Image: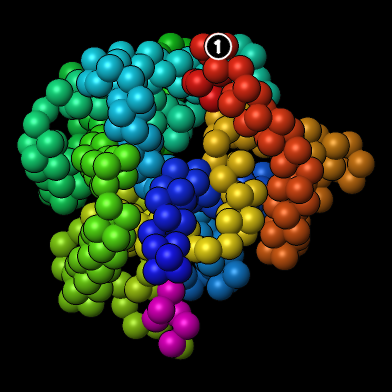
Amino acid sequence: MNAALPHTTTTANRLLSIDALRGLVMLFMLLDHVRETFLLHRQVSDPMDVTVTEPALFVSRTLAHLCAPVFVLLTGLSAYLFGEKHAGKRDVSVFLFKRGLFLLVLEFTLVNFAWTFQWPPTVIYLQVIWAIGLSMIALSALVWLPRQMLIGVSLMIIVGHNLLDPLHFPEGTAMHVPWAILHDRGWIELSDTLRLRTSYPLLPWIGVIGLGYAIGPWFARSAVAASRQRKLLGWAIIGFTAFIALRVINGYGERPWCFGETSLLSLMSFFNITKYPPSLLFLALTLSLGLLLLLSFERTQVHQAIRPLSVLGSAPMFFYLLHLYALKALYVLAVALFGLNQGNYFGFDSIWAIWLTAGVLTVALYPAVRRFATLKVQRRDIAWLKYF
């Protein structure tokens, strides 16, 4: 009987582990957004300049690299599991399309206002919610592909999109706007008073969400936990191996790294990877780490250790909007109390203050997120709650 316990436990943890991983990367996101709010006077480049970026700041920013890839992968996986509970691909396709549109509306309204506090806006930053929304709309069509074809298309996008890096289209040409959305981070001038910044080029994220949907059968009710865990470990090893092999030789899929004056600088250079758009090696490293974390959460026997993370991960959009407005309120309050102490900004002098603020905010926001997550479970009759 004892021999069967680990299998039973991991089966029960199948969905808990997904929410817990989503919750963990959202905490990394919170840390990064605290950095962007209170360390605006020390913005980092993409990829970072390791010669002027202190190790603590480098680590803080690198942790945040996990957020978007893991969240988009889990979005695709959750879409598959949604189909398991409903009529199948048609319900999945309709839900993905409607929720994608919903996210686009949020990006243009509540999310952008939280960053800029400007209405009507003069600049709209098309960031991660925009990318996820468009990826969901793309996946609403891709779900109709046979699974092997979906895997092939997704891997082709992830592996091959760096071949398009030299391709650029200047403003005023027919391809400038679609290419700025798909692959080139840039500006779109809508009028004399409004322009868009495509902070998250879309194309690679379509590959990631497609891959997330394609691994859905690993997590189906009928799937064997031991088989799923072998696949998670095996593909994580393949991803890590590809990252190390290509990175060591400065091969395809990322800007070159170099040896620094110290071992630490060399190590930082090695793991200094490009997010906008996410390079092949960026995705190989972050998705491999995500698979390992998913495996670790499923295997853990201490349920209470991951339940707080799973609460955050079960109400992701609510937490996302709540933390943005809490950060804006904190910043306005800090300016009112202390003034602008970093040129045109109020900001912290040290990285530890960023971590401390992120920790305090997590504790402060957790009760509201938990109540909302409970409401989602108790009131399944309220249709709009599932969009959060």
Picture coordinates of residue 207, whole percent (x, y): 23, 40
| Screen quadrant of the C terminus | top right
Answer with left or right where residue 324 lies relative to residue 6. right
Q: Which residue is mark 1?
A: 381
Q: Amino acid at mark 1?
A: Asp
Q: Is residue 281 left or right of residue 14?
A: left
The magenta segment = 263-268
- Give residue 281's position: percent from left, percent from top: 27, 60
Image quadrant containing the N terminus: bottom left
Q: Quadrant of residue 196?
A: top left
Q: Is residue 35 left or right of residue 249?
A: right
Q: Position of residue 315 (x, y in %)?
A: 57, 33
- 197 vs 17: above or below: above
Q: As rendered, which of 187 and 299 lies closer to the eye?
A: 299
Mark 1 neighbour class, 10 Å CA radius: few under 14, some 14 to 19, many 20 or more: few
| Above-or-below relation of 311 to 47 | above
Q: Residue at x 57, y 11 (%)?
A: 382
| Residue 266 within the segment the image draws in magenta | yes
Colour convention = rainbow
The residue at the far bottom in this view is 262
Please, which residue is most extreme toward the front here? 1
Q: Main secondary structure of the magenta part?
A: helix
Using the rendered image of the protein, determine whether residue 121 is visible from the camera's viewpoint: no
Q: Residue at x 39, y 81 (%)?
A: 266
Q: Residue at x 63, y 56 (%)?
A: 304
Q: Secondary structure at mark 1?
A: loop
**In the picture, residue 190 is in which quadrant?**
top left
Image label count: 1
